[in-house]
Amino acid sequence: EGWRQTVSTTTDSLHTLLRLRKPFAVLSDAQFSGLLASARREEMPAGTVLIEQDAADRDFLVLLTGELEIRRRYISPSGAEELEVGRLFPGDGAGEFAVLFGAPRQASVRALEPSTILRLEGERMDELLAWSQRFTDELRDTASVRARMPTRASSACSSRRPDSAGAASGRAKPFGTT
């Protein structure tokens, strides 16, 4: 569809994509180059669960192509429910809570269509947190925005898409934006 963006996965385009986004924009050239060199590009078929709620892994993911859904399990008076709470589009990231706090995953993330991600290992992200207070602050800002995401499917992102200016109606807050 016309609204969809595909992010090129060449080194130059990845550099440009991430360099313009918080928290990566605050890194030195050496820190940024080291992070990009350690990242892994992965192809995911539709239906693949990339992050499982309550899992202990700590990698950070950046979506390059495709679309991902964010789902959370809740206990309600009627029993356990799993609700969609957001969608991720090219350029968006996931995993800031696990990276920052070493906490179990707060939600599950699943590919809605064939998708390409950039996986940044948790250990490498730890190094950046230790080296750069600004990087840590920017990632905390992102976590704060995500913590305020709606928790009901009807108020979260249903089928709305980003508008022509790139803003979103009903979309999960893009990684690195406030």
Image (spheres, helix red, strand yellow):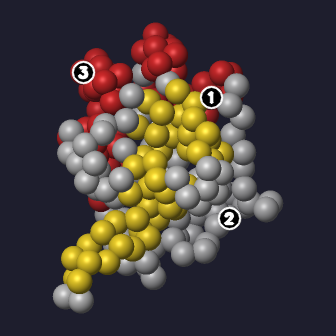
CA gap between label 2 and label 3 equals: 37 Å
- Give residue 146's quadrant in the image: bottom left
Crowdedness near tag 2: few (<14), some (14–19) or many (≥20) residues, C-alpha within 10 Å: few
* Picture disc at residue 163: 2
The amino acid type found where label 1 is placed reads Leu
Residue lying at 48% horizontally and 33% vertically, measured from the top left: 119
The amino acid type found where label 3 is placed reads Ala
Mark 2 vs 3, N-terminal side: 3
Mark 3 vs 1, N-terminal side: 1
**Dot 1 corresponds to which residue?**
14
Q: Is residue 20 visible?
A: no
Q: Residue furthest right?
A: 2
- Give residue 107's quadrant in the image: bottom left
Percent x, y for residue 82?
36, 73
Circle 2 or circle 1, nearest the eye? 1
The amino acid type found where label 2 is placed reads Asp
Percent x, y for residue 1?
79, 62
**Dot 3 corresponds to which residue?**
130
Percent x, y for residue 144?
30, 53
- Give residue 165's quadrant in the image: bottom right
CA gap between label 2 and label 1 equals: 23 Å
Q: Are marks 3 and 1 in contact (CB under 8 Å)?
A: no
In the rendered image of this protein, does residue 175 appear above or below residue 162?
A: above
Residue lying at 61% horizontally and 39% vertically, measured from the top left: 43
